[in-house]
Amino acid sequence: MARLEKVSYGGWTNCLKLSGDGVEMVITLDVGPRVIRLGIPGGQNLFKEFEDQMGKTSGAEWMSFGGHRLWHAPEVFPRTYAPDFQPVDHIWKDNILKLVQRTEPETGIQKEIEISIRDKAVHLVHRLINRNPWAIELAPWALSVMAAGGRVLAPQEDFIPHPDVLTPARPLVLWHFTRMNDPRFTWGDRLIQMREDSQINSKQKFGLRNTQGWAAYNLGTDLFIKAIPFISGETYPDMGCNCEFYTQPGMLEVETLGPLVKLQPNAATEHIEKWRVISNVKLPQEEKPLIAILNSHLKDFGLATIKA
């Protein structure tokens, strides 16, 4: 059974620690909604913490803080960057923690995140509610800001040789600042890998339509797997992306998105993720032996494995 306790963390007086099934999280209540820490009990924080922003509750502009947050897509300035300095309400009932943000005055959007731990996984429901008197189009966008020094593992679609199937399998979406020859990339047969490298002083991003249902981040001997749904027939933002990955010196983001919806006044849209944290995993650099190890953890999580 999950355990919830009030703690101070990173300079914020009001935080909650939610733990169980070998995982622990710290959630901020002074700002957010945000999960600022994720890891095994006593282990490293898989999420990035921006030290110069920790503990702050006000500022002249939006702050990332780090951790896991909820946004709305597509990315538009200044709408997307509405600051979240207000205190967050919470409800703890039936082993589900519900975080409720005050309606953003800049956007008329209210954010909620429900978190529970069961079956060795963290279950999250991200919810956007339209509090405007008019309809708006948006998509829920869940961003996990990962700590420096790791690599993201993004699955390719199943390989089928030519000419067995002649139709395309997936969009790969690039931004104006994306450089495909960046040394942080490994374009593998079955995986796309992107490393965080704090020595490379530039930004990098790519997106996918990911029907395989997962993405992962490997930091040291910890493996973070994020499971997501893909809803066939729906329209996703950013040329069809339900997964996006962004890095700059010091951090890497594992981002997932729900479909675009036209949200009527007081209506809500939801986006679901499941997380699993696995410790003492040694993943090699070479793709074939890496996949052999990764597949065992994907199978145990009930996810699609990578076909040879």
Image (cartoon, rainbow, N blue to C red):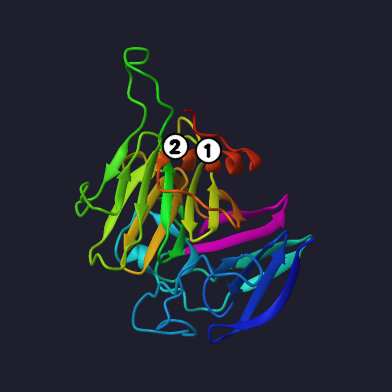
Front position in the image: 282 or 115: 282
Give the side of residue 89 with respect to residue 182, left or right.
Answer: right
- Count of numbered tags: 2
What is the x, y in percent for residue 297? 60, 44
What is the x, y in percent for residue 209? 39, 38
Give the side of residue 233 with respect to residue 24, left or right.
Answer: left
Q: From what the image shows, is residue 301 above or below residue 131?
A: above
The numbered disc on residue 288 is 2
Q: Secondary structure at mark 1?
A: helix
Amino acid found under the numbered disc labelled 1: Ala
Residue 123 sits inside the magenta stretch? yes
- C-alpha gap between disc 1 and disc 2: 7 Å
Q: Secondary structure at mark 2?
A: helix
Residue 270 in view here: no
Q: From what the image shows, is residue 29 above or below residue 154?
A: below
Mark 2 neighbour density, 10 Å: few (under 14) some (14–19) many (20 or more)? some
Highlighted range, magenta = 109-131
Residue identifier under label 1: 292
Labelled pair 1, 2 in contact (Cβ < 8 Å)? yes
Q: Residue at x 45, y 63 (%)?
A: 146
Q: From what the image shows, is residue 63 above or below residue 145?
A: below
Q: Residue at x 38, y 84 (%)?
A: 59
Amino acid found under the numbered disc labelled 2: Lys
Residue 118 sits inside the magenta stretch? yes
**Quadrant hosting residue 301:** top right
Residue 221 in view here: yes
Quadrant containing the N terminus in the rendered view? bottom right
Mark 1 neighbour density, 10 Å: few (under 14) some (14–19) many (20 or more)? some
